[in-house]
Image: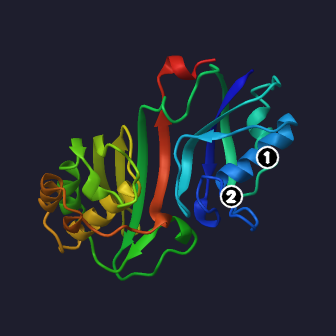
Amino acid sequence: MPRYKLTVAYEGTDFHGWQKQEPPGRAPLRTVQGVLEEAICKVVRERVSLVGASRTDSGVHALGQVAAFSTTREIPLERLPRAITARCPSDMQVVEAEQVDESFDPISDARRKRYQYTIQHGTGLPPLFDRRLVWRTHHDLDPGLMNEGAGLLVGTHDFEPFASASHGRESTVRTIEECIVDSMPGSRVRVAVVGDGFLYNMVRIIAGSLLEIGRGARHPRSIREALDRNDRALTGPTLGPEGLRLEWIEYPRERSAG
């Protein structure tokens, strides 16, 4: 059967995360997977099973989420993104479609992911038009100190102190290739993280830890201490979902080629 890979963007505020949720005796919750799967079914005119690469939480956004499905129908690729998007709500779009090998798995075939977390800081006016996309703190932040701490995250480490207790993974060892804090206009900073995989709430805890460093509540070396001692008490709070966005997911060329 033909298998299609979709690149999907969504504003996650009004979704209960990516994964379908159907509580017993209640109506299904509004999730990205559930809404997108229904839109695809209307286009291909048969039921499909949609698999997503990253199970983003409630309120988390995506610019480059990846999902895949198989169908008995051959569909012109140039029509597929527009046809699915036309059947989606206004807070979701399919931006690209590719035909891939039947064995393509968005989860296990993923090699690298990039997330970014945006924070507005200081006592100025709160964000308005993009308020659902930014985390706000009244503290003034020092991006230089934050970058110093961010650099200590690069490498292969046991990131358990940067994960929620309910992460559900056998191994908590991950590799971070890049972690950079940039200053942005409007008293904002952006934390960008690239790695081979991420634990539950890992990026939001990284952002919370760097925020604590940026406001002077922790020293940059607290990052190293948390990793060395494997101690969650040495890391920062889990920031809210609104500042987090999945930017892209990278795959080997031979796995995503049609």
**Which amino acid type corresponds to the residue marked 1 in the rendered image?**
Ala
In which image quadrant can residue 48 be found? Answer: top right
User: Which residue appears at 49% of the width and 74% of the height?
Assistant: 127
x and y, in percent, of residue 134 in the image: 47, 67
Point out the image quarter for the N terminus. top right
Picture quarter with the C terminus: top right
At x 29% / y 48%, what residue is drawn? 179
Q: Earlier in the sequence, mark 1 or mark 2?
A: 1
In this figure, which residue is indicated by the disc labeled 2? 91
Quarter of image, res 58: bottom right
**In the foreground, 25 or 39:** 25
Q: Position of residue 32 (x, y in %)?
A: 66, 53
Label 2 Cα neighbours within 10 Å, binned few <14 / some 14-19 / many ≥20? some
Q: Which residue is at a point 30% across and 46% down the rendered structure image?
A: 172
Residue 43 placed where, x, y %? 84, 38
Specify whether residue 154 is in view: no
Q: Where 37 sits versus 122, above or below?
A: above
Check the image and report above or below for 245 versus 249. below
Q: Find the residue positioned furthest to the front.
A: 24
Please, what secondary structure does the residue beneath circle 1 have?
helix
Label 1 vs label 2: CA separation? 13 Å
* Left or right relative to 240: residue 121: left
Residue 230 quadrant: bottom left
Left or right: 248, with 85 as reference point: left
On screen, residue 52 above or below 143: above
Q: What's the residue at 21%, 68% (across, down)?
A: 233
Amino acid type for the residue under numbered disc 2: Asp
Which disc number belongs to residue 39? 1
> Which of pointers 1 and 2 indicates the residue nearer the eye?
1
Question: Horizontal placement of 32 versus 85: left or right?
Answer: left
Q: Is residue 162 visible?
A: yes
